[in-house]
Image (cartoon, rainbow, N blue to C red):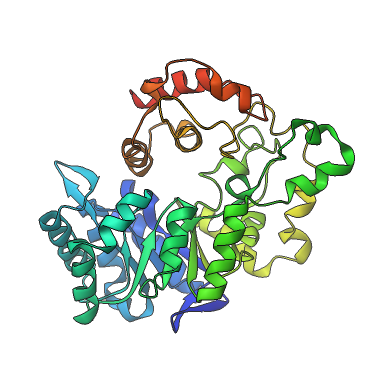
């Protein structure tokens, strides 16, 4: 295993994103934790509020707590037997105390301000009692460093400019990062095609550069785009990337320190760990993307945002992203359901005007996708 430093803390380049442990028994969780330890994985992200998974993880790491570097989330709560993201301070404090108790620890290495995707919400948090509580946790050494998790690069940029926030957890993978050509015909121009697949959305470039400039570390979530990139039928590239290629992409982003892989079993963890011994050829994602079919994005949302604005104020790119992440599962993961729920406007607000479709570079039937999203999530 190779390691990087986050604010002076040594973390493994591959981390354990434990979301999929919610449905596992203690023995299965312990097997995963032991496999991580045996292979040098020492960074654990626990955003989950489910008491059972917290207790199972705490029991599994109890004898080796000092080995682990934990990202613990502030604002992730358990209410009425389900996960709820909240800024209601009595619930926030109760849930974080519960996290400490169930993980059998009196400190968290990285206290993560949980899931902030709206700029207005970020401003409210930073200037309100939520942040006062975060500062108190740090002053009391209950958390050692302050981080923030988000899916929104604009929020991430604001966090990177905040000197008190040392770590940002954000998704990074080719599907979320790639910028499509502004002119649709570029996708049918052989001379332009290879370059266009390797361009990032400008906001992503700015974010990565800003994190470099401000010495803000990044840990990566969703490196496989919820598994979408590993399946040629689901990938917008119409060709499958390997876990090794996705991990290499994520780790080579500026300021990226660790990739938190969401894995269900030791076999999947083993595939991720094979990155450490992989050849440069095996890691090379460019050779796959450069040979992707020229129509690979046609009909598939790339979350570029060119479809905006929506007269109903739907964030079409985010709705489509959560649909794509959810639809590949038999049951919608609770985190994705919560992310969708917390959007300001949902698919059921679509009036079917089709204005967005006239602006989409890839011919996505957005009105139909809104209908399918409404059917999938129920609203």
Find residue 246 and report its image quarter: bottom right
Please state which of residues 252 and 211 is positioned toward the viewer in this rendering. Answer: 211
Residue at 72% from the left image edge and 40% from the top image edge: 181
**Looking at the image, which residue is at 74% across and 34% down?**
183
Q: Residue furthest right?
A: 191
Q: Quadrant of the N terminus?
A: bottom right
The residue lying at 36 percent from left, 55 percent from top is 28
- Give the image location of residue 279, x and y in percent: 75, 66
Vertical order, 313 against 20 (above or below):
above
Residue 365 visible here: yes
Q: Position of residue 117 (x, y in %)?
A: 38, 49
Q: Which residue is drawn at 14% across and 57% down?
A: 89
Q: In this view, does 114 lie to the left or right of 81?
A: right
Q: In this view, does 184 lie above or below 61?
A: above
Find the residue positioned furthest to the left.
Answer: 90
- Left or right? Give the position of 144 relative to 367: left
Give the tally of numbered discs.
Answer: 0
In the rendered image, residue 2, in percent from the top left (x then y), is placed at 58, 77
Whether residue 262 is visible: no
For the residue pair 356 and 70, the one nearer the viewer reads as 356
Judged from this view, the residue extending furthest toward the top is 352
In the figure, 268 relative to 336: above or below?
Answer: below
Give the position of the C terminus as an image quadrant: top left
Q: Which of 295 and 327 is in front in this view?
A: 295
Q: In which quarter of the image is residue 334?
A: top left
């Amino acid at each position: 295993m190779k390691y990087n430093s986050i604010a002076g803390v040594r973390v493994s380049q591959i981390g354990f994103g434990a979301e999929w442990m919610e449905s596992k028994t203690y023995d299965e969780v312990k097997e995963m934790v032991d496999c991580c330890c045996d292979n040098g994985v020492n960074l654990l992200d626990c955003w989950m509020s489910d008491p059972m998974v917290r207790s199972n993880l705490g029991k599994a790491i109890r004898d080796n707590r000092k080995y682990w570097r934990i990202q613990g989330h502030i604002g992730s709560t358990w209410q009425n037997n389900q996960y709820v993201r909240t800024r209601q301070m009595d619930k926030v404090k109760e849930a974080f105390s519960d996290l400490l108790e169930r993980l059998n620890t009196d400190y968290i290495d990285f206290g993560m301000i949980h899931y902030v995707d709206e700029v207005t919400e970020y401003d409210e948090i930073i200037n309100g009692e939520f942040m006062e509580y975060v500062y108190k946790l740090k002053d009391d050494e209950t958390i050692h460093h302050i981080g923030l998790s988000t899916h929104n690069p604009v929020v991430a940029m604001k966090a990177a400019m905040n000197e008190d926030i040392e770590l940002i957890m954000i998704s990074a993978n080719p599907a979320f990062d790639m910028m499509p050509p502004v002119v649709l015909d570029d996708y049918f121009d052989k001379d332009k095609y290879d370059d266009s697949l390797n361009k990032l959305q400008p906001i992503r470039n700015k974010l990565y550069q800003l994190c470099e400039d401000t010495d803000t570390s990044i840990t990566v979530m969703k490196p496989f785009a919820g598994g979408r990139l590993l399946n040629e039928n689901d990938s917008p590239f119409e060709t499958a990337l390997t876990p090794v290629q996705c991990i290499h992409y994520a780790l080579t982003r500026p300021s990226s320190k660790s990739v938190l892989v969401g894995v269900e079993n030791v076999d999947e963890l083993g595939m991720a760990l094979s990155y450490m011994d992989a050849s440069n050829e095996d890691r090379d994602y460019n050779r796959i993307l450069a040979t992707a079919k020229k129509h690979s994005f046609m009909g598939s949302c790339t979350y570029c945002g060119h479809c905006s604005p929506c007269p109903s104020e739907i964030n079409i790119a985010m709705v489509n992203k959560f649909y794509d992440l959810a639809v590949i599962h038999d049951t919608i993961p609770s985190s994705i359901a919560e992310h969708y729920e917390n959007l300001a406007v949902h698919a059921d607000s679509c009036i079917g005007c089709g204005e967005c479709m006239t602006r989409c570079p890839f011919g996505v039937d957005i009105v139909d996708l809104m209908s399918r999203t409404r059917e999938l999530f129920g609203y």
